[in-house]
Amino acid sequence: MDIDDSTCYVRDPEPISADLDQEVVMLSVDMGKYFHCNESAARIWKMLEHPVTPPCIDDQLQRLFDVPTDECRAESRAFLQLLLEKRLICKVENAPA
C-alpha cells in the first residue's frame, strides 16, 4: 500500500504516545512494540493527530526545517509508509478537503 498525496492520513487510536523533549515514544499494546521518533518524525506524528495530506505535512516541515523539497518529500513519504505498514496510521475515507 503506497502513500497517496491526495489521501488524508490520521493516527490510529490504538498506540499510546508521549512527548519526550522534542521526540515522541509510542507503545502499541496490540503489537507488543514500542517506537521512538526523532524530532522531525515527532512533528509528523503530531500533525497526524488530525487528518492531513502528505503535501500539507511537507509544507509544514519545510517551514520548520531547512530541508530541500525533494529530500523532505522522500523522507516524509518513507516515514508515512512505515507508519502505514505498522498500522500506526490509517487512511481517512471521505475526509473534508
Image (tube, grey):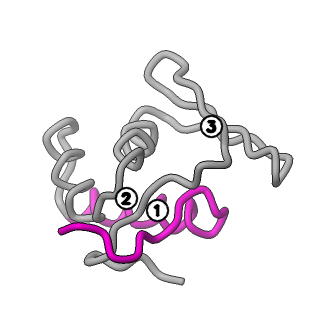
Foreground residue among 91 and 85:
91
Residue 84 lies in the magenta-colored region: yes
Q: Are marks 1 and 2 in contact (CB under 8 Å)?
A: yes
Residue under numbered circle 2: 76
- Give the percent coordinates (x, y) of residue 87: 64, 63
Residue under numbered circle 3: 36
- How packed mark 3 is, by other alpha carbons closer than 10 Å (few <14, some 14-19, many 20 or more), is some
Instruction: Tell me the distance, in whole angstroms, between the alpha carbons under discs 1 and 2.
Output: 6 Å
Q: Which of marks 3 and 2 is nearer the N terminus?
A: 3
In this picture, residue 1 sits left or right of residue 55: right
Identify the magenta region.
70-97
Q: What residue type is labelled 1?
A: Leu
Residue under numbered circle 1: 80
Residue 78 lies in the magenta-colored region: yes
Q: Residue, x 62% and y 37% (percent of image)?
A: 36
Q: Residue, x 22% and y 64% (percent of image)?
A: 55
Q: Which amino acid does label 3 sit on?
A: His
Q: Residue, x 53% and y 59% (percent of image)?
A: 89
- Give the percent coordinates (x, y) of residue 5: 28, 75
Relative vertical location of residue 5 with respect to residue 21 in this rendering, above or below: below
Q: Are marks 3 and 2 in contact (CB under 8 Å)?
A: no
| Image quarter (top left, top right, bottom left or bottom right) of the N terminus | bottom right
- Give the percent coordinates (x, y) of residue 50: 36, 49
In this picture, residue 49 sits left or right of residue 7: right
**What secondary structure is marked by label 2?**
helix
Foreground residue among 66 and 6:
6
Instruction: Tell me the distance, in whole angstroms, between the alpha carbons under discs 3 and 2.
Output: 16 Å
Q: Quadrant of residue 70?
A: bottom left
Q: What residue type is labelled 2?
A: Ser
Instruction: Tell me the distance, in whole angstroms, between the alpha carbons under discs 1 and 3.
Output: 14 Å
